[in-house]
Image (spheres, helix red, strand yellow):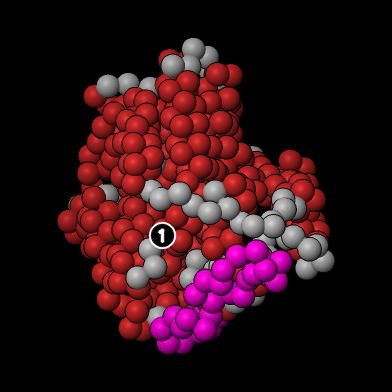
Amino acid sequence: MVVLDLTVMNLALPSAQRALHFSAADRQWVVTAYALSFGSLLLFCGRLADLIGRKATFLTGLIGFAAASAAGGAATGFPMLVTARACQGVFGALLAPSALSLLATTFKDPKERAKAFGVYGMVAAAGGGLGLLLGGALTSSLSWRWCMYVNVIFAAVAIIGGALLVPRQARAVGGRLDVPGVVAVSGGMFCLVYGFSNAASHSWGTPSAWGFLAAGGALLAVFAAWQSRTAHPLLPPRIVLDRNRAGAYLTILISGAGTFGVFLFLVYYMQVTLGYSAVRSGVAMLPMVLFSGTTATLGNTRLLPRFGPRPMVVAGMLLNTAGMLWLTRIDVHSGYASALLGPLVVTGTGMGLIFGMAAATGTFGVAPQDAGVASASINTGQQLGGSIGTALLNTIAAGATSGYLADHLHGRPTPQLLQLAAVHGYTTVFWWCAGIFAAGAVICGALLRSGPLARSETVSEPAATRADQPSTV
């Protein structure tokens, strides 16, 4: 529900804009309001789940997300819609780390844990593509409002299952909320997401872009310094200093930045250049969804226990690189079977290897009282990577398209020239995405340890906590 919501509203925006009569300049806030609240509160909400119990925060997040979705679907104007989207982000930030940390603390048997994280990786890798399919179908057949209302149905099922089936989770004993850390990291993430959003919609030279990015970087530096000094850190350094966990978080960030090019620009190409409908473009993405889901489950149950995370990340990044390079061959009249199907299958396979592995590795060996914030670190990496990808790739596409027009324009631009310029922008983005994934294969492959995950990587519990709780393996 949370991953799907990152993409489903993109297809509903034009219809919502016509229905509620807001301007094109205001339109970005429907997406940005969600991203700001979601990205800035993830670490805070992850620690909150550890302190008050993950089942409680999971159910609270579900109820709040459903209520905000219902309010957004019933919006009578732009302010109501944006407020509902911001509230969705708040409860999504509570829900996402709670859900992942529930997996980390509930499934103890290695085989069951592998299956659980395989399913999680399948959902994470496929959610964006399913959002495009569902968003197109709902917008075309019903109304843009159902892109919001559908969350109520998902949440109702999850609330019943969570209340009846999820065991009660113990709270972290003796833990305290790091208020200065919350202020620093939430402010830093807010500034970074807002700065990247402004860079994507305006330019990198505007004060609302570079000013907020600089402020965000400074606040995160303050946060990092504070975490090594405080007695009750929001993000204990012992979590991120482990090479495998740090590698998993970095993998998600880099993959999030590159994956943006697959979803957004490929959909633009199919709908604007090839003339696909919203539903047809969603169906066209299904092979990527199916292969990412299958590979995530297979990778976590068969490959990760035997080979460890490093080969899976390197293989996944290289497969994504190959898929992006394949997509650079598209033109104005490309056919689906000849130009798109192959890259979608290859990229889906790579994404499946990455997402399932990162979720399992990023929470492996973490003490129960730190599971929520460790899970939030994964979601934060994905959110920040998506924001970086949005700003960077939008700028690259716009520059490449403008440059092509300047080089080939003689008189007034023809529709054919405009299409050629747009395709040149898309292929330039795919070249950059290939470079991002290739760099990820090298950097993350060097950071991750070789071999299977070992039980010796378990994080030691703080002394204060050990005194109050039985030891856990």
Is residue 22 visible from the viewing direction of this image?
A: yes
Which is more toward the observer, 406 or 178? 178
Give the residue displayed 36% in from the left and 84% down from the top: 307
Secondary structure beneath dot 1 equals helix
Which is more toward the observer, 419 or 151? 151
Q: Which residues are magenta?
A: 444-473
Is residue 28 visible from the viewing direction of this image?
A: no
Q: Position of residue 115 (x, y in %)?
A: 30, 65
Q: Position of residue 21 (x, y in %)?
A: 50, 14
Is 288 included in the stretch rendered in magenta? Answer: no
Q: Is residue 351 left or right of residue 395?
A: left
Q: Is residue 126 above or below residue 305?
A: above
Q: Residue furthest bottom?
A: 451
Give the residue displayed 38% in from the left and 22% down from the top: 145
Give the residue displayed 20% in from the left and 52% down from the top: 335
Is 460 included in the stretch rendered in magenta? Answer: yes
Which is more toward the observer, 410 or 194? 194
How many residues crowd mark 1 within 10 Å: few (<14), some (14–19), many (20+)?
some
Q: Is residue 398 above or below residue 221?
A: above
- Mark 1 sits on what residue? 106
Which is more toward the observer, 53 or 439? 53
Q: Is residue 11 left or right of residue 400?
A: left
Q: Residue furthest top?
A: 76
Give the residue displayed 22% in from the left and 39% down from the top: 280
Q: What amino acid does circle 1 point to?
A: Thr
Q: Is residue 227 above or below residue 148?
A: below
Instruction: Say which quarter of the image contains residue 240.
Output: bottom right
Q: Position of residue 212 (x, y in %)?
A: 75, 46
Q: Is residue 401 left or right of residue 36?
A: left
